[in-house]
Image: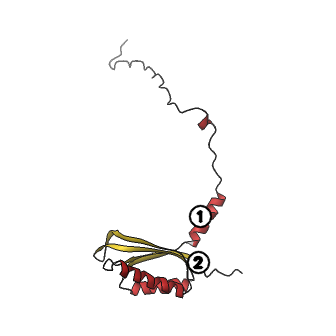
Amino acid sequence: MTTPNPQRQYDMVLLVVPEKDEAGAQAVVEEFRKLLVDNGATLEKDESMGRRRLAYVIKKRTEATYHNFLFRAPAACVAEVQRKMRLSESILRFLSVRIDEEVKHGQKVARNTKPRRPRPEAFDAPYSPPSPSPSPTIPPAEPAGDSRE
């Protein structure tokens, strides 16, 4: 019987409403950073991506301040942070993805994939396009008509 790892790895992106200036957006991010750490998360990456234009209009807004967190935390911590983000008027959207399974899967695929070796004839001679072959001659067709003998 194996014990599950309570510290899973997550990637979270949140969009702060554009009405907040830079200091206001940083205050919102700091609030959620503190909430993550207080609930037992260990931050691996904490990156502000700046103000960007949205791909489509969300709640009549065309831009937002993006922020990215990469962290390890128990599932209860992530659930609590997501609940607070849903209630917050300052968060336009957020997305949190558990990425430890994808990393494990990628490592497994890399382990099981054989490395490709280039074909030796590909590097022996420089590339030259094939020479055109002469077109075959087609005999003329017999005229269509009455053939009486």
Whether residue 74 is situated above or below residue 136 in the rendered picture: below
For disc 1, the marked residue is: 106
Classify mark 1: helix, strand or loop. Answer: helix
Residue 147 on image: x %, y %: 36, 16
Classify mark 2: helix, strand or loop. Answer: strand
The C terminus sits in image quarter: top left
Residue that sits furthest to the top in the current view:
149
Q: Amino acid at mark 2?
A: Arg
The N terminus sits in image quarter: bottom right
Identify the residue shown where x is 30% and y is 77%. Answer: 59
Residue 131 on image: x %, y %: 49, 26
For disc 2, the marked residue is: 8
**Residue in the foreground of this view, choosing between 46 and 3:** 46
Mark-to-mark CA distance, 2 and 1: 16 Å
**Residue in the foreground of this view, choosing between 61 and 36:** 36
Give whichever of discs 2 and 1 has the lower sequence position. Answer: 2
Residue that sits furthest to the left in the current view:
60
Identify the residue shown where x is 40% and y is 73%. Answer: 66
Q: Quadrant of residue 13?
A: bottom left
Residue that sits furthest to the right in the current view:
1
**Residue in the foreground of this view, choosing between 46 and 94:** 46
